[in-house]
Image (cartoon, helix red, strand yellow):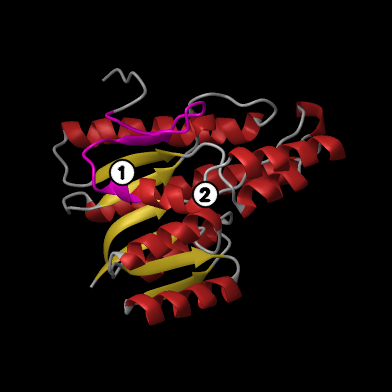
């Protein structure tokens, strides 16, 4: 049985991606920290779509957990890995919470890199894909989200370079990048509420997310389009809000 692996699947974009692929009759391996939400999602999807859902509860910001998780799932026939787990924060450099910053780097960069590398090693000559979730902030730096934006620049550059290397090597495995813009998710609201900024600014930002953000269901549809396309990058235009598929967005010298 073929499986799609989705990290950060308990809510937001990750949850909607799980629902979309379940509706297309893919079996799922889902992982996040909140067991109750994952168990509820498992029951909902198995009952509705008659597919198999495997649940794993891990905090992937801890590298040891990332290795444990992969060792537990690697024996399955995995067709797609969606590295979606991540979080953001907004603060002036002198107001940065270093513990939170380290955790963000560990999750947004380290966990993604470990899973991507392990999956490539095991599936280089298999018709399979990795979709790494970056952000528009990974192509165009945003305001005071300096660390978050830097982690997403890493995801974008890392993924596009790997894609180039895989193509030159004629590998069957493909690596792609999904770059959402503002999205109406718990991720966005939590990032704003926990940000070290004035209360009024938090309220304004939440209103912007709710009024201008894309529904996470649309991002799941975009993920499906990217998965079925021959393009490498799927990005939501930050101004026109359209989903655009591109061969690449960065110049890579090789």
Q: Quadrant of residue 3?
A: bottom left
Per the model, the C-alpha gap separating discs 1 and 2 is 17 Å
Residue shown at the point (85%, 37%) measured from the top left: 200
Taking 135 as reference, is 100 left or right?
Answer: right
Considering every residue shown, the one lying at the far left of the view is: 170
Q: Tell whether 72 sits left or right of 150.
A: left
Position of residue 124 measured from the top left corner of the image (x, y, whole percent): 21, 49
Q: In this view, does 185 lie above or below 27?
A: above
The residue indicated by pointer 1 is 226
Marking on residue 39:
none
Q: Position of residue 226 (x, y in %)?
A: 31, 43
User: Magenta span has 243?
Assistant: yes
Residue at figure coordinates x 32%, y 40% from the top left: 176
Image position of 207 (left or right of 246) = right
For image coordinates 32% across by 20% down, the residue present is 252
Q: Quadrant of residue 163?
A: top left
For the residue labelled by badge 2, is the local secondary structure a helix, a strand or a loop?
Answer: loop
The residue stretch that appears in magenta: 224-247
Please state the horizontal and vertical placement of residue 238, each as a whole percent of the image.
51, 29
Front residue of 239/106: it is 239
Q: Earlier in the sequence, mark 1 or mark 2?
A: 2
Q: 252 or 247, which lies in front? A: 247
Which mark identifies residue 215? 2
Instruction: Find residue 127 and report its horizontal and vertical position in percent.
Output: 17, 53
């Amino acid at each position: 049985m073929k499986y799609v692996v989705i990290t950060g699947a308990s809510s937001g974009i990750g949850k909607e991606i799980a629902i979309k692929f379940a509706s297309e009759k893919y079996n799922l391996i889902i992982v996040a920290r909140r067991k109750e939400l994952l168990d509820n999602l498992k029951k909902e999807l198995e009952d509705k779509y008659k597919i198999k859902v495997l649940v794993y509860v891990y905090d992937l910001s801890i590298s040891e957990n990332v290795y444990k998780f992969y060792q537990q799932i690697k024996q399955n026939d995995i067709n797609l890995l969606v590295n979606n787990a991540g979080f953001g924060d907004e603060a002036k450099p002198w107001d940065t919470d270093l513990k939170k910053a380290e955790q963000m780097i560990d999750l947004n960069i380290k966990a993604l890199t470990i899973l991507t590398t392990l999956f490539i090693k095991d599936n280089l000559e298999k018709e399979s894909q990795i979709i790494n979730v970056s952000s528009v902030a990974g192509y165009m730096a945003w305001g005071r989200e300096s660390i978050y934006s830097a982690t997403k620049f890493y995801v974008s550059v890392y993924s596009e370079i790997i894609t180039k290397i895989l193509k030159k090597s004629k590998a069957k495995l493909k690596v792609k990048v999904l770059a959402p813009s503002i999205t109406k998710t718990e991720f966005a609201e939590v990032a704003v509420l926990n940000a070290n900024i004035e209360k009024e600014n938090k309220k304004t930002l939440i209103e912007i997310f709710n009024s201008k953000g894309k529904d996470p269901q649309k991002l799941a549809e975009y993920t499906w389009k990217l998965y079925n396309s021959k393009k490498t990058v799927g990005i939501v235009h930050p101004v026109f809000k359209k989903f655009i598929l591109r061969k690449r967005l960065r110049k890579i010298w090789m």
